[in-house]
Image (spheres, helix red, strand yellow):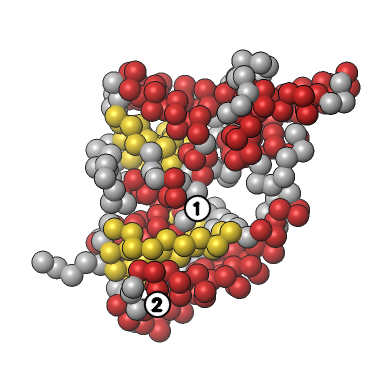
Amino acid sequence: MPEPVILLGIESSCDETSAAVSSGNVILSNLIATQKIHETFGGVVPELASRAHQLNIVPVVREALNQANITKNELHGIAFTRGPGLVGSLLVGATFAKSLSAALQVPLIDVNHMKAHVLAHFIKSDKPPPALPFLCLTVSGGHTQIVMVHDHEKMEVIGQTLDDAAGEAFDKTAKILGLPYPGGPLVDRYARLGNPAAFRFPTPQAPGYNFSFSGLKTAVLYFIRDSLKTDPDFIQKNLNDICASVQSTIVSYLLQKLFRAAEETGITTVALAGGVSANSLLRHDLVSRAENTGLNWHIPAFEYCTDNAAMIAIAGYYKYLRQDFSSLSSAPLARMSL
């Protein structure tokens, strides 16, 4: 049998420094160093993020190799996130990957962060990967897309946000409610205790399979502002119900578009990817709706939903099989299409 391809994956697109080691489609280790410093500012500060990556990347990579019981000389290649993301953060990961690739004289593989989220479905697990083609709802703080996945390389965006992303809508809601950063997971936590029908928010409107969240964010802002005028303790009294109502509106909107796309394209498999795919209601409702309509469904393991290097490693693996390597001159890209 041929020797398995062993890769080091590096992810540094935003505020988490991650390193993973893969052997074929098996993840041997996956470490994430979260940057706590941004909590003070209520959001990611790009300059502070890049500095934290510089401090974290060497110990994170070293520990990923140790946990995988792999030495750097056993690596067949280095995969890294080229974009999209914060340029300063991407530059730290890219520079480290290039240096290590050159020192070890192994191939360098640049990875599209959004493709990597989709390809997380192909990390070996107890459940077989989704059959091709499938539709993937990719939702994060910066992106909201419906992707038609034809194969490991060919992906087609058939719908996307026209303004803000779903994750941004969650985080903005949290900020309006006075919740600390990162607020999206807190909205999810409080929503579990609330009534999703307590308050009504307008369903956003966008053509086709596209999305729009700017209007919803404004509606939540005005609703809270007006409610506080009549009752200064309105948020404190109704926090769970507010979170549940906003979350229900967002999740219903996302899945409405996804399942409409499945019906109209005839594709029988739907999937989730991206940081917001960790949301408990989104995961629950996708499974419930898929099973009720006879569709196959796939959701990555929780640890592969948020930004992580395992997804970079698996994306790099499929590029390695195609001998699709990068040069040392490749530059990070803040914007990068599928």
- What mark, if any, has residue 294 been given in the picture? none
Left or right, 240 with respect to 248, comes to right
Relative depth, front residue between 70 and 237 = 237
Q: Residue furthest left?
A: 1
Mark-to-mark CA distance, 2 and 1 = 22 Å
Relative depth, front residue between 139 and 283 = 283
Q: Count of labels shown?
A: 2
* Quadrant of the image occupied by residue 203: top right
Q: Is residue 39 above or below residue 108?
A: above
Dot 2 falls on a residue whose secondary structure is helix
Dot 1 falls on a residue whose secondary structure is loop
Q: Quadrant of the N terminus?
A: bottom left
- What mark, if any, has residue 101 been given in the picture? 2
Residue visible at 57% across and 23% down? 248
- Is any part of residue 139 visible from this angle? no
Residue pointed to by mark 1? 307
Q: Position of residue 129 (x, y in %)?
A: 27, 43
Q: Position of residue 291 (x, y in %)?
A: 33, 22
Q: Is residue 96 above or below residue 199?
A: below
Q: Which amino acid, mark 2?
A: Ser
Mark 1, other Cα within 10 Å: few <14 / some 14–19 / many ≥20: many
* Quadrant of the image occupied by residue 133: top left
Relative depth, front residue between 95 and 174 = 174
Q: Which amino acid, mark 1?
A: Asp
Mark in front: 2 vs 1: 1
Q: Is residue 165 above or below residue 218?
A: below
Q: Position of residue 174 (x, y in %)?
A: 70, 37
Left or right, 249 with respect to 67, comes to right
Mark 2, other Cα within 10 Å: few <14 / some 14–19 / many ≥20: many
Residue visible at 71% across and 53% down? 39
